[in-house]
Image (cartoon, grey):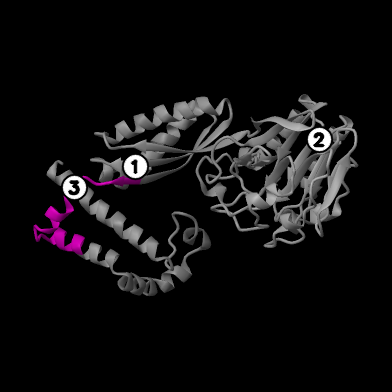
Amino acid sequence: MSFTFIHAADIHLDSPLKGLEKYEGAPVEEIRNATREAFHNLVNLAIERNVSFLVIAGDLYDGDWKDYNTGLFFVNQMTRLQKEGIKVYLIRGNHDAQSLITKELKLPDNVIEFSVNHPTTEVDEELMVAVHGQGFASRSVTDNLAKEYPQKLDGYLNIGILHTSATGREGHENYAPCTVEELGAKGYDYWALGHIHLREVVFNQNPVILFPGNIQGRHIRETGDKGCTIVHVKDGHIDSYEHQSLDVLRWEICDIDASLSETIEDVIEDARIRLEQLQQKADGRFLAVRFHITGSSKVHQQLIVDKEHVLNNLRSMSFEMGDVWIEKVKIKTTRLLDMDNLQEQHTPVATILEFLKNVMDDDDLVQSLLEEFNDIHNALPYELKNGEDGFNFTDPSMIKTRLKEVEDIILHHIQTKAGV
């Protein structure tokens, strides 16, 4: 017998926006609706491919989200699958454990939700499949849940569903930790994992252990192609599996090397070429891009001083292209000037540069500056203190970054005056 199933995870339906409204031209509605549209694509795919069942390995919802329209949307999509005879195997992840919707809405009969108290097994005698799973009972589960999963059922294709960080992944809390060896010891054919938002094949056969990633990127830390995994079963064994894109809006970080740029216009032109390449790769999806401009460059100081000019030109370019939004431009270039030579000239400017360097190198002095700025920090509104570009006067690295920017502005004026 041959059949197909889909493994998805980390849906985060209606994940709330955080501060996007403050960005000029931000596609607020596109981002707000993206997780729903991607989930709709998932259900469409299941129906079009005539899959036997869908596995959702946790984090269907996004925390203590009280809007029942989110839950009703999910029920509606599950009803579509029910009409097609498609089962859904579901476990709660760390975000679902907080959700009131998860606990109070009645789901259609085709949705099988596993216990949060102990591992349980669901057997499909027609397909000869045994599905094992356990959800999260609370927001933070640090126990090794996999350890209590049962051994395989002989004569069945065995699938384990687990929301876990496995051996730990950067940027993710260490929930339900386990090792590849522990998972392999259960004798299952396939481990459908969730929690890690980046697609990763942990082990490629006997058993297949896989994170499909989330189905829709929600911010700039979730870049690239997002979707699910389609798994093909033949004669009681995993025959093959493949990634399928589902996202409707794609986030990308675009690196621009300004090492050979003679002018800011050169940088902007290089950015235009890369943006066109990314748009083609996005295949009709809305594109949200952050530029990182890097390299040791003669236009370094000018980029620092005229950052708004660069940003506005890139955003204007994106408007012309359509379905592209420039989320941010980060200037990460370095200067070409000989700092040692400048400081040896004993000019007033050299004295200022030396002072700035001494402050940046002296952690105690930086700390004393933070204390001086304490009243200013307390007076600033929340939105100016937080985020990557916020003025957080409790953070020593912020002070050093701002002093570096002052240094760059001074050096830019030196270059301009000298005609460098």
- Alpha-carbon neighbours of circle 2 within 10 Å: few (<14), some, or many (≥20)? many
Q: Is label 2 in contact with label 3 (beta carbons under 8 Å)?
A: no
Q: Mark 1 belongs to which amino acid?
A: Thr
* Residue 410 located left or right of residue 389: left
Cα distance between the residues tagged 1 and 2? 47 Å
- Helix, strand or loop for disc 1: strand
* Residue under the image location 90 percent in, 33 percent down: 126
Tell me the residue that label 3 is attached to: 337
Q: Which mark is residue 294?
A: 1
Say whether residue 194 is magenta: no
Is-magenta flag for residue 336?
A: yes
Q: Which residue is mark 2?
A: 53
Callout 2: helix, strand or loop? strand
Q: Determine the image quadrant of residue 268.
A: top left
Q: What type is the residue that disc 3 sits on?
A: Leu
Q: Amino acid at mark 2?
A: Phe
Depth check, front residue: 129 or 137: 129
The region drawn magenta spans: 332-354
